[in-house]
């Protein structure tokens, strides 16, 4: 089978899976969980910003017990904010037109309820490992649904479908952007550059991931805010250069989003499909990836991490993806690029070049390097949780780290369209599995949300104890002793109150 035949086959599978399974399930689950949580993703936006500032508690030596809410936010943002924000959005506009941006926005708002539920469940069912916590879908499948075999199946699928497949796409995009910039500077043959970048990326990845999750957190905590703000700033400059085109851009986005006369020709379906698929690839809401790191946060209530990761969806899609959309649409209002095939990051690069000259291509190459490299580190963190679920040993973690660095090398040298097609198929597989699971466990997340809201109404900083919901089984990390450091004041040594009542008077 030739590369073209392989690409054609994978693309056919991808289109069918998304059309008949992926999009219907995503839409249904997003609406269902939004209804069950009474639109938590809109009602608690102020709490999202408060929760992100929660500090991790420290041991007697002053060492933090686990990752803080902000550290987990930056790790998950590092995996979310990557190729999907630049190449993915460009591809969505090329495939579905400007209207795809609207559907990307809309689905981000609805599917963020799924992000809230999965991250809340990950916190509830997290377990201890050395100086941190671990958790994620495999853990809430085992502990919430009571099936370890189901958790192992998820972990195996996730390691291959997400941690390895998506990592190859990130390294591929780095090389694609770098060679594009080199071409702009006059380099005719970029073959040697591809191999040099493959070796360098592999080496850098190995140095960081072999050191473990804390090293990943330290790198992403510094890099993610800088690279996100730099990209947003470039986008604002482009918009300022083309400010007179902004009304027309909004007109294109909303006008084509509701152009139902094109439905008969299939254009409407292509537009919605492009928006939903590329949007989910970008923000990962409901995919089961983010909960793997959300579980590692040291917070006083599971709902807090659910809110933090919901904010991550908004940052990714409503801010970063919108920047890309505006860069492209204000620069190319005639949309001539829609006649081309395999449109991706090079479209965004062309838009920046049109506004800044060669500096635009170079700047985007550097930004993509930071975005995609931190995404590789974020993907490593996700996969590590699932490896440790299957085999809780340091040897297994290091074998996985070595395998991931090898995938970085392979991803750098394969064709870009093949990398995207493989990622599209693997994404729908893992998303469907997780969406079904969080729908089954959604009632537990709703109970936790009501518990959180009840304490907020009393003017308290919410704190959860396993004894507050004694009917929930397999809860490991929410005992009175575990949460002592999260209290504003120590609990009374002797008291007629139950543990649950003391939790509600912890101030």
Image (spheres, rainbow, N blue to C red):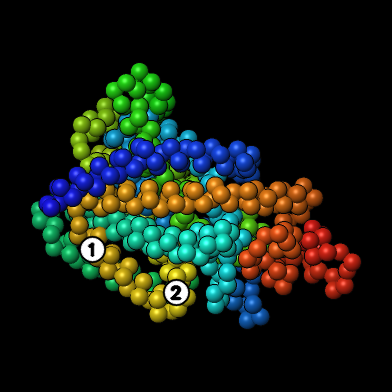
Q: Is residue 361 visible?
A: no
| Residue at position x 28%, y 32% in the image | 332
| Residue at position x 38%, y 59% in the image | 157
Circle 1: element type: helix
Q: Could you say where residue 47 lies in the image, as x and y percent from the top left?
A: 64, 49
Q: Nearer the viewer, residue 398 or 358?
A: 398
Sequence-wise, which precedes: disc 1 or disc 2?
A: 2
Q: In this image, 116 relative to 17: left or right?
A: right
Q: Could you say where residue 91 lies in the image, as x and y percent from the top left?
A: 30, 40
Q: Quadrant of residue 54?
A: bottom right
Location of mark 2 (residue): 391
Dot 2: few (<14), some (14–19), or many (≥20) neighbours within 10 Å? few
- Residue situated furthest top in the rendering: 261
Q: How many marks?
A: 2
- 354 w.r.t. 412: above or below: above
Circle 2: element type: loop
Q: Nearer the viewer, residue 504 or 447?
A: 447
Q: Is residue 253 visible?
A: yes
Q: Quadrant of the C terminus?
A: bottom right
Location of mark 1 (residue): 410
- 196 w.r.t. 371: above or below: below
Disc ID at residue 281: none
Q: Could you say where residue 266 lies in the image, as x and y percent from the top left?
A: 31, 26
Q: Nearer the viewer, residue 386 or 295?
A: 386
| Residue at position x 59%, y 48% in the image | 442
Q: Nearer the viewer, mark 1 or mark 2?
A: 2
Q: Quadrant of residue 16?
A: top left
- Residue situated furthest left in the rendering: 188
Q: Could you say where residue 94 lies in the image, as x and y percent from the top left?
A: 28, 35
Q: In this image, 197 relative to 497: left or right?
A: left
């Amino acid at each position: 089978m030739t590369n073209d035949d392989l690409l054609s086959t994978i693309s056919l599978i991808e289109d069918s899976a998304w059309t008949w399974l992926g999009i219907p399930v995503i839409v249904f689950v997003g609406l269902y969980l939004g209804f069950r949580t009474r639109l938590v993703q809109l009602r608690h936006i102020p709490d999202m910003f408060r929760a992100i500032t929660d500090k991790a508690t420290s041991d007697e030596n002053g060492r933090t017990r686990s990752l803080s809410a902000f550290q987990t936010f930056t790790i998950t943002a590092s995996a979310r904010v990557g190729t999907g924000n630049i190449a993915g959005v460009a591809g969505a506009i090329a495939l579905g037109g400007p209207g795809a941006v609207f559907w990307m926005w809309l689905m981000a708002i609805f599917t963020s309820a799924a992000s809230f539920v999965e991250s809340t469940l990950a916190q509830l069912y997290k377990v201890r490992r050395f100086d941190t916590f671990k958790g994620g879908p495999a853990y809430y499948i085992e502990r919430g649904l009571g099936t370890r075999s189901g958790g192992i199946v998820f972990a195996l699928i996730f390691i291959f479908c997400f941690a390895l497949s998506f990592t190859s796409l990130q390294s591929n995009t780095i090389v694609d952007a770098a060679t594009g910039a080199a071409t702009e500077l006059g380099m005719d043959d970029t073959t040697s550059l591809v191999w040099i970048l493959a070796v360098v990326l592999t080496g850098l990845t190995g140095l960081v991931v072999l050191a473990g999750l804390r090293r990943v957190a330290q790198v992403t905590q510094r890099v993610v805010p800088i690279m996100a703000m730099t990209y947003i700033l470039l986008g604002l400059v482009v918009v300022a250069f083309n400010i007179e085109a902004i009304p027309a851009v909004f007109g294109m986005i909303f006008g084509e989003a509701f152009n139902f006369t094109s439905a008969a020709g299939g254009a409407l379906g292509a537009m919605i499909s492009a928006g939903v698929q590329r949007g989910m690839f970008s923000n990962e809401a409901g995919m089961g990836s983010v909960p793997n790191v959300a579980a590692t946060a040291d917070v006083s209530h599971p709902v807090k991490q659910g809110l933090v990761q919901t904010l991550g969806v908004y940052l990714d899609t409503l801010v970063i993806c919108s920047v890309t959309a505006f860069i492209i649409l204000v620069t190319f209002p005639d949309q001539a690029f829609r006649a081309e095939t395999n449109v991706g990051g090079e479209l965004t690069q062309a838009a920046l070049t049109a506004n800044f000259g060669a500096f635009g291509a170079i700047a985007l190459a550097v930004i993509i390097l930071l975005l995609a490299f931190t995404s590789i580190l974020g993907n490593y963190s996700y996969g590590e949780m699932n490896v440790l679920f299957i085999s809780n040993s340091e040897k297994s973690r290091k074998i996985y780290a070595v395998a991931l660095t090898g995938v970085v090398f392979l991803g750098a040298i394969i064709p870009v369209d093949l990398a995207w097609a493989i990622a599209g198929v693997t994404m729908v597989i893992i998303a469907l599995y997780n969406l079904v699971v969080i729908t089954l466990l959604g009632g537990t997340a709703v109970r936790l949300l009501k518990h959180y809201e009840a304490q907020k109404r009393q003017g308290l900083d919410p704190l959860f104890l396993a004894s507050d919901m004694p009917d929930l089984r397999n809860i490991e990390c929410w005992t009175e002793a575990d949460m002592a450091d999260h209290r504003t004041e120590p609990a009374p040594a002797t008291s007629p109150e139950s543990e649950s009542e003391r939790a509600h008077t912890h101030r």
